[in-house]
Image (spheres, rainbow, N blue to C red):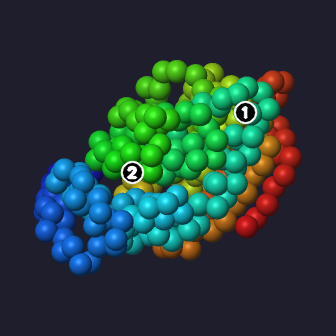
Amino acid sequence: MTKIGWQIYKISRAVKLLKTKVQREIYRFYPSFLLDEETRRLKAQLPKPEFTLLISPWYHDFTVLGFHTRQRRGMYRPAQECKQQPLFDLIDRAISLCRKKENPASGIELFCADGFYSNYAVRRGAAMVHGTDRDAYDLSKARLITRILGNQGKITFEQCDVFDIQDTYDFAICAGGLYHISNPGELLKLLRGKIRTACVIQTIYSLSNTSEDYFESRSSRGLGGFRFSYSYLLNMVGDAGWRILEARTNEMKCHEHLEDRGSAYLLCVPDQTRNHNDAGIEREAKL
Ligand SMILES: C[S@@+](CC[C@H](N)C(=O)[O-])C[C@H]1O[C@@H](n2cnc3c(N)ncnc32)[C@H](O)[C@@H]1O
């Protein structure tokens, strides 16, 4: 990047940060008559900073889990609509695979943001979930909604990089994250050593480049991050020592570029034979 390009990048980041801070302040003065009954009730109970946190926009709308949260504008709602059901289905399957083996099932949610899928998992029978993300702000929202939903005894959250996870778990949820990191294959290998029974993966992949070896950085285009083809993803998962039990795909039409539109959902189990070149999918569906 040239010196001027770098300056422009720094200024636009500073403006964005300031805008977010101003917006968060504005929510302190959100008029009560615009709030739904449940939120108004909480206004009387929560300390002011927590109430501001509650009414500022969320990554996810938690209505389906029992509490309506106002969602951020833009692609957040359509993205949730696209991802939610396939992920719910695969998380259900992962938990039932764990139940067959061990009871109770413990899980980790990587890239958890506001902990939407952690809360779903405990609601569906997981005994304990540990949510991790590097974003302190979304994690504070995660802790708050977890308390509101009454799940605080079953879910813990930790601010850390995804490569710093320590413990072992029965299952993992890794949604919306692989395309954020430069070495997703390494993360899948790390998880192979830490997850006993099942791993649910969701990631964006490119609909425009289908070659097996396509992997590139798209940090300055579209959604940014890293992009790969569907076949690259399947090979990477197999090479990391996972067997794919179920694979689904759908299209995130809310994203402008074809490179950002593919969305894959995988239910994986540790491959005991470690035949890494054969992804061995048992069931595959285009949604
Ligand atoms: C697209 S959101 C995914 C939210 C949710 N899992 C979902 O799928 O709806 C990506 C999240 O990953 C987090 N993240 C990105 N890179 C990370 C890293 N290296 N370590 C930990 N968290 C990271 C971001 O802070 C953000 O909250």
Q: In this view, does 156 lie to the left or right of 49?
A: right
Residue at x 63%, y 54% (from the top left corner): 87
Q: In this view, does 137 lie to the left or right of 209?
A: left
Residue 148 got which mark?
2
- Tell how many labels: 2
Q: Please state which amino acid type lies under the numbered disc 2.
A: Ile
Figure quadrant of residue 235: top right
Ligand 1 lies under 8 Å from the Cβ of mark 2: no
Which of the pair 278/266 is nearer the observer? 266
Between disc 1 and disc 2, the foreground one is 2
Which quadrant of the rendered structure holds the C terminus?
bottom right
Residue under pointer 1: 98
Local crowd at mark 1 within 10 Å, few (<14), some, or many (≥20)? many
Could you tell me residue 190's position as x and y percent? Answer: 57, 26
- Label 1 vs label 2: CA separation? 27 Å
Q: Is residue 13 visible?
A: no
